[in-house]
Amino acid sequence: MIEIKHLYKRYGRFLALNDFSLNVAQGELFGFVGSNGAGKTTTMRICVGLLKADGGEVLIDGKNMLRNHRELAEKVGYVPDYFGVYKSLSASEYLHFFANAYGIYGKDADKLSAELLDLVNLTHKKDVDVNGLSRGMKQRLCLARGLVHNPDILFLDEPASGLDPKARYELKEILKNLSSMGKTIIISSHILPELAEMCTSVGIIDKGHLVLQGSIEEIHRAAAMSSPLNLTVNENQIDDVFAILQSNPFVQKVTAQGSILKIVFTGTKEDEGKMLASLVSSNIAVNSFYREEGSLESLFMQIVSGQAAAPKRS
Amino acid sequence: MSKPKKNKTNAVLYKEMTIDMKRPKIMIIMLLINMFLVPISFCFFMGIMISSVAASCSYRVLAWYLIAMVFVEATLLLFLTPAITAGSISLEKERQTLDVLLTTRMTPWEIIKGKYGSDFIFLALMVISTFPLLALVFIYGGISFFQLLYIGLVLLVFIGFISCFGIFFSALTKNTIVSVILTYLFVMIYISITLSFPFIVQAIIATINEMLYEDKNLFAWITNPHFINGDIFIMLGTFNPLLMIFDVLGNTIGYDFGDMYSVKGMISLCGTDVLPHFTQSNILVKLWTPISMIEMILISLGVLKLSAVILNPVKGKVKEKKRNVSIANQQQ
């Protein structure tokens, strides 16, 4: 449904997007993760037609976003990482205005505004000035604004940023609800675990390049595999163990802390078994062999610092 | 969620008209401009009343009243219009609402039209609100209702013309203060240049002719067909909005003043021997105001279109493949 092909974007000397490609299927709740300045917002702004890429293209339902902006604007909703609210308007008037911007007026706009306020649990605040709403409420109102034209695709740029736990929970519930309606949602954040809780798939961007993309199960698996293997052997056999490990193609790095060896291993469970068997068959006294519990945060940190050899699926 | 029917009303204009126009700020500005004009009007009529006691009063005095009021109003509008219009788009940028608007179905041209339309309507209301004060000239007569309406129409073209520059600089800059300053500067420079340029050009041409033909008579080129004829440059004056107001006032009330208070009167002040083509029958002299109005409407449209181009976040066409290669090369 959304195909991003070889995007390039440069701001002066800084290359914000470097051959960035991504596919998001219809109905996915896609988490777009990257550290600050990785290129998330730039990608989103190009996708919604607010920025022109220096190279590459964005296809939505097979149509180029730039060339068919007016037509595709009907299909795409965008909630930027700022509120963009008119302070003098009430919540209801605000949604009315954006309904008008999509050509919806009068009773239709009234009905739509009421529906949307209900969807984001703000019906009780419909007559309150937007300025008087809390941060979480403003974020929900902006989400409602992005849904005014009932788009098939929704781009949300760091919507949970600055929200308290309650507001985050409410936002997540709304997004899950929207996802169940069949909408394709692309949500960006710099916190991978936060997105992993609700997304169906995730992509990690670093220095303007997609470094990892996969389903949430694959990401969890990658996280589990990204933590090092712990091997405890007799100290007098350390040199022999090093020699064996060096010959294994899946061993990236080995560090010794006394009799404990920490092995960065990129192979599968089967490969792990084979490595253990080769150690045992070489008469190495293996006292313990286990993998540390992996976390999404550590996976993300390893990816952005270039240590992890995570599986990339395109 | 249901998909309702689509309507083509401009959302920005609709919002400004239905919500923003109800704000007290709007009423206060209208009140202030009228409060500024009322004392002038009061002083004039007091003066007439006092002088009428001693002697009869000519209706020409009322013509002076109209000239004074229209020029004071035009000056007020000249200062007020940039302040009102130069924040239209830049405020949207400062509030970060412009990006959101640009992702809707509205095109940059529609946003510009909405903003310009609402500002223009507000300024037009301000002009209309001062009409009762201008209409006081009807007490003594000498001017018809349609002539007053024509003056009003010229004032509307005037504010429409100044407004478009406010919108342009507002679209060009991100900061309202910068936009307001740029608009004031531009308007002042534009008015000064279009006011002085035609006459400067005349003087330059006369000097060149004198140098070329070594004729000590500065105006010899007028009678000698071989000399450079600079009459056409007078037409540059039609681009000046103040001259347009000056001309319409002169045409309306100038008959008893020997044309002194119109553009043609001003040209004739130079002496008909200086600009022999600009006689009463000259088409430019006759149609100065309509020509000025058409020029200003066209310039306004052009400037607004340019503003829409500036506002478009994805200007120009994309040349994906060619650019890809060049950036890929830079990478290597």
Image: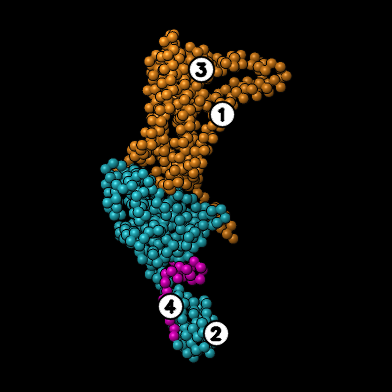
Checking the image for residue B180, the label placed there is: none
Q: Which mark is residue B192?
A: 1
Is residue A308 shown in magenta?
Answer: yes
Q: Residue at x 38, y 36 (%)?
A: B25
The colour style of the image is by chain
Chain identifier, colour orange:
B
Q: Are marks 2 and 1 on the same chain?
A: no
Residue B65's place in the image compared with B92, above or below, is: above
* In this view, the mark in front (1 or 4): 1
- Judge from the rendering whether residue B3 lies leftward or rightward of residue B44; answer left or right: left
Q: Chain of mark 4?
A: A
Q: Are marks 1 and 4 in contact (CB under 8 Å)?
A: no
Q: The residue marked by circle 3 belongs to what chain?
A: B
Q: Which residue is mark 3?
A: B261
Q: CA distance from mark 4 to mark 3?
A: 94 Å
Q: Count the marks: how many?
A: 4
Question: Residue B121 in the image: x percent, y percent?
Answer: 39, 32
Secondary element under disc 2, as helix, strand or loop, is helix
Q: Which residue is mark 2?
A: A243
Residue flagged by tag 2: what amino acid is it? Ala
Give the residue at mark 4: A292
Which quadrant holds the C terminus of chain B? bottom right
Magenta residues (range): A288-314
